[in-house]
Image (cartoon, rainbow, N blue to C red):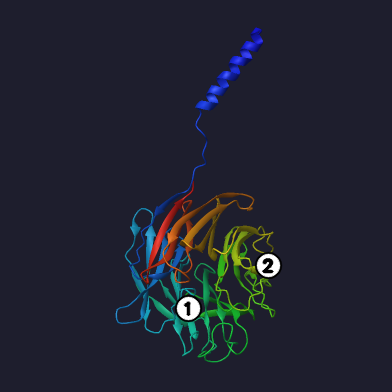
Amino acid sequence: MDKRSITRFRFRRALAALLLAAPLSVPAAPTVQDWPLAAPAGAAQPSLDLAPDGRLLLAWLERREGGGHRMRFAGHDVVQGWSPARTVAEGEDWFVNWADVPSLVALPDGSLWAHLLVKSGRGSYAYDTRLLSSRDGGVNWNAHGPVHDDGTRTEHGFASLWPQAHARLGVAWLDGRHTGGDQTRHGHDHHGGGAMSLRTAVFAADGRKQQETELDTRTCDCCQTDVAMTARGPLLVYRDRSEGEVRDIVATRFDGQAWSTPRPVHVDGWVMPACPVNGPAVAAQGEQAWVAWYTAAEGRPALRLAASTDAGDRFGPPLEVTAGEALLGRVDLAADASGVWLAWMQEDAGGQSLWLARFAHDLGREHWRLKVADVPGRGRGTGVPRLRLRGGEAWLAWTVVEAGQPSLRGARVAPP
């Protein structure tokens, strides 16, 4: 063997030794930490919002001794932790349901706004969406009445609230004024009259309604709506309902003057004779927007995620995140500079579980996915998880049901 061959041999042997000695590269995994919440035992129906000052605002419902309910909230600061819980309102005639949940939002002017659901008649689904506001951090609250003024004892719910301007509130809700009279004997999709519609309105700082629009005259009766702020105005998503009972997701945006014609995010063609009670979620950053939703088109449950680069005018082909009978849907969605974060629920023979995944903005890459928690409870009582992003981390709140009693749990997920 000549000197050159000996040199190559020694080099290869040394390289092999280095490779054998080097540790294997294992991708880092996200870190899940318990996030103790301010809500007491018995709380349910969580709402989670990120205030302009960086606090996370958690609201919930709890039962009162002697009957009725109260809505309370607390703010969470990364350094100082939870503020003392405050009461928004309480009453004996509220509509309390796992799917249609009150909410609390903070506007840029520092005001807090909440919506509640209050029974308006004997019917199971005869209730109003009513607004309240506070200008002193939630110490005192002003009641502004229903968002609608049709006076019918029908369903008015599944509302979404957003900051329409510095001190003005935007609200969208499902409106049952065309479905018939007092809904005493009729349930969802069987009102004996017309169809559920979707309406929006803008409210001034003093609670006065400034404008109202009927966006869609035929929508799904009881699927959640959602809204996100794009660079070109609020983008609203909801589940539509055609004459042929197709229940696909559509989107519309307000440009400051009018709402655009609602367009399908994707034509799934899901024919469903009754409301699936499984609404979409939307997130936005600048002119980028994303929508996540559950579908069971052709009898196959699936979770889909689609992206838009023009503030929701058009969406690209959807990514199928997961599929199968274990999928419950019940999604929430958020986005930041690192990507798009999607939370959803599953249930199999082992019980329910909460999942979280993060994707690239163009959905071309899935960074990771993980099971955040096993969720005690079965069926619908565990409701819909809530997801917000702060400081590059995901903050989640959800309901568990143990021994027939609900309570809230929370988690903080840090990326690798």
Q: Residue 399, percent across and down?
A: 42, 66
Residue 269 vs 333, above or below: the answer is: below
Q: Is residue 100 above or below residue 109?
A: below
Task: State the residue in front, 88 or 401.
Answer: 401
Seen in the image, is 66 located left or right of residue 161? left
- Residue 258, placed above or below residue 368: below
Q: Residue 321 in the image: x percent, y percent? A: 60, 57
**Mark 1 or mark 2, whichever is nearer to me:** 2
Q: Residues within 10 Å of mark 2 (few under 14, many from 20)?
A: some
State which tag comes first along the sequence, 1 or 2: 1
Where in the figure is residue 40, as x and y percent of width and height?
A: 33, 67
Residue behind mark 2: 268
Q: Which residue is the site of mark 1?
A: 207
Residue 291, visible in the rendered structure: yes
Q: Which mark is residue 14?
A: none
Answer above or below: position of 191 versus 53. Answer: below
Mark 2, secondary structure of its residue = loop
